[in-house]
Every structure is written in C-alpha cells, then in structure tokens.
Amino acid sequence: MPRTNDAINETWLADRDRFSCESIEASDRSGKPMIRDNGEWRESTWEEALDIAAEGLRRVNGELGVLVSPSATTEEGYLLGRLARHLGTTDIDHRLRRQDFRNQSEDPLFPSLGMAIADVEKLGAVCVVGSSLRREVPLLAHRVRKAALNGAHVSFINTQRYEYLFDVSEYRVADDLTAELGALINVARGQATKGDAHGNIVAALRDADSAAVLIGQIGMRHPRFAEIRALAAQLSDFTGAQLAFVSEGANSAGLSLAGVLPHRGTGGASIGQGGATAADIVAGPKQGLLLFGVEPEFDCADGTAGLQAVEQAGFVLAMSPFFDATLKAHADVVLPIATFAETSGTFVNAGGDWQSFGGIAMPVGDSRPGWKVLRVLGNLLDLPDCGYMSSESVRDELAQIVRDANAHTLPGNRFSGEAPAGAANLNSAAELDIPMYRIDALVRRSRSLQLTGEGQADEAFNGRDAVEGRKIA
C-alpha cells in the first residue's frame, strides 16, 4: 500500500509496486550465507562467509568491479562507494542499462526533473523524448495526464507509438530521435516553417508559462544518448523549457548523490581520471566482481556480456536476496540481504525528495539489511569510521557531505565526439524498451505480474516463472 503523500503519489500506487512484494517469498529466496567450498556450495555462518568475502576482496588487490542495482538504498550506495574506493577501485556504477557514457562529466548531479513532482501537472507544455512514460514511471505519467487535462500541450518523440489515456497534441515516431530533435532546433532557430508538428511543439514550449523537455528511459538507454541529451538541452535553451530526466530504478538519484559512479564521488565530487563504467566492467574480465542486487544477464544493457563477466571473474561476491542459477554456477560467496520491505533506508526521487522508510517485514531466514552487511564488511577490511549504529546515521553523514559540497546541477548541454562503435546495432525500440514487469529481480519473480497481459506479452519470459523456467498454469 502507498504511504499517503499528496505531493508525490496522491495515494496512488502502480501494480508493479503493489505486487512486487510477492518476490519476498520466491522459490530461490536466499536465507543463508553460502560459500563455494572445493567446488560445492554449503551453508555458512555469517562470520565465516564475511571473513571469506573480505579475504577475496583483499586478494583482487584493486582489480575490482562493482555493479549496483539502481534500486539499492542511498545508504547502501554510500557504503559501497566508500568500500570500493578504500579497496583501491573507482570501477563502480549503478547505470546498468546505459550504453553511451560519452561526456558523462556533463551529466547533472543526479537525474532530475528540475522541479517538484507535483509541479509537473502545472506545466503548460511538455515534450517527452524517448519514453514509454506510463510503463516507466506511472505516477509521473499521471501528473502529465493531469497537465494535459488542464490544457497543456503534450508531445512525444519516440521510436514507436505508445497508448496514453489523454489527448496527445503531437506524436512523432522515428527511428532516429536525434534527427527529430534536430528538426525541432531548426524551427526554434527560425530555419524551418512553423505550422507543422515541429513548429507546433516549439511554439508550445516557447509560449507556455512553464514547460519541460523530458528525456525518458528509452532515451537515456539509447546508444546515442550523448547527442540526445545535448540536442534536448539546446531545445530547452532556445525555448526556455526546463530540461528534465526520468531516472531509472527506484533510486538512481540517490545513488548518484552517494557516489556510486566511476567519475564522481559523494555529492558530485571529482575523482580525477575516474574508473570503468558499467559497460566497461562487463566488457572486460575483472579479477574481482561485486554484485549488489544485480542479475547481470537481465539487468545490464548487454546481458550476454554481463553473464560472461560473471563467468570470467576470478572472485565473485554477490549480495542478493536471491540465490539464482547464475550465482549457483559462478559466484564464490553469496551474502543474503533484505529486500526493500525488510530494511530501513532512503530513496531520492526525481524531484529531489529524500524519502526515508523503515522495514515492515522481518528479513527471511538469516538475511540481513544490506547496510548492516556492508558496515561489518567495512570493519573487516579496516574501512575507517565505519561504526554506524543505524541507517539514519549513514544517511545523515551522507546528507552533510552533500550539503557541504554545495553541488549544483550541471547543464548537460555540451557534446563532442563520434558515435561509439556499434551504436547502430542496439537502437531498436524492442531492445531499448524493457518490459515493465522485467525491469528488476523483484518484479521478475512476482507471479501475479507475470500472469498479466503485460507479463504474457513479454516474449523473453512469455508467462514463465523467471526463477525456475516453468510455464505458469
């Protein structure tokens, strides 16, 4: 059930969020620490498993890649970032489905709407670029619908047409999103004739008292995201509209602030040359790999490469609520951590709101909240000042660093460089638009969601149990 908060959810909750809790009792739920002993798995005590995990991380000697679920809590992300840098690596990332990292230094401090969520319904014009908005962020789509019902001009630039429950003013479908944005900029510069779809979109953005150019998750996953962002920023500049981003997962914003990035530390601090992005981590074998709530074959932009990275790593430490087939085949230590419902923590939404919560269910078996596991692991690895007594103490320390950094949202409107090699191979809507009941480990294990029309229509699962591969009757 949703927590009542009119400024954010107006007491609404999407089915995806309501029924994902079924995964808490999934058949592959991990309730005991597991270690691989002479090629065979056995249950372990927490003390033994943590000692082996710490020794494995020491042994990789900085050759460590860290992949983090974008739905990890802010506290977990902060401790993971501290731990990674203490171990001598900046190869840490939560942007698992992003392909184009060119000019990532120009990314905003965190993927943000640049306004409060409630203010979206007050916009007079919205141009949505690369988004299946209803499926990506249903509560944001609800606010856009309210804006449309209030008379706002709502337009879409997408690789395919999606259904919306309001009148869309203009809908442009094109394989090349950059060409459509370029056409809009030409109009805004006065280099094309107004009166057609492009002219109507530009006029609406320019004439509205408040307007936004909103880049969705399809756009952010696109292999030419650098150009999409730069062109969208130019369009915003020419029209006076706010440039906005739809964050991926429950907590991309919080993890960005926490420093779960290869090129920035906590609060956006520069870390010099920087490390490997998520795409780099899965592209090249690592001596060590730490997976936090991640199933690489499903969660990474290149699932095949993600699986190969796990297969080829010398040491694999997984912190996960689940003990799935990939971990059974390739991990060395699996530490069972709590789901969102069984831990306390903080998510930061795209409006910049810090939303803290407490666990409302007991962790399954011997699983533990992720922040507690990381705290103990940090102590074993001699991470300084790691004696946190609560998730709130972790949150408050991070919040103070963010305040002291006096960080500001970067413009994100500069671009240089060529398109990455192979960019044209991964730009179809089918590959960029992740079905909404396949986006993370929780919804993939929700039987109710997989039985819906959306779940049945997903060819990758097609009504199958995501854990055991059995046909759901």
Image (cartoon, rainbow, N blue to C red):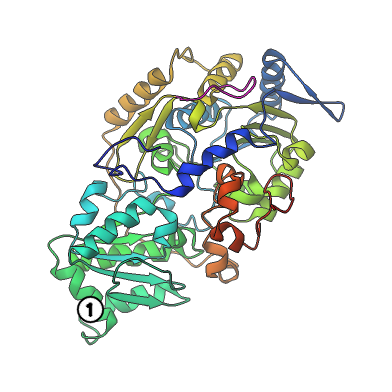
Is residue 322 positioned above or below 110 on the image? above
Q: Residue furthest front?
A: 473
For the magenta stretch, what is the residue range?
Answer: 359-368
Q: Is residue 363 magenta?
A: yes
Q: Which residue shows up at 30% across the image and 72% down it?
A: 168
Q: Which residue shows up at 48% across the image and 32% down it?
A: 77
All told, the count of numbered labels is 1
Is residue 318 positioned above or below 364 on the image? below
Residue 102 image position (x, y, % from top left): 47, 57
* Image quarter hosting the N terminus: top left
Question: Looking at this view, is 57 or 105 the one in front?
Answer: 57
Residue 321 image position (x, y, % from top left): 61, 32
Q: Is residue 417 left or right of residue 231?
A: right
Q: In the rendered image, which residue does mark 1 sit on?
A: 200
Q: Is residue 204 left or right of residue 429?
A: left
Question: Looking at this view, is 18 or 80 the one in front?
Answer: 18
Q: Is residue 209 left or right of residue 316?
A: left
Q: Secondary structure at mark 1?
A: helix
Q: Residue furthest right?
A: 38
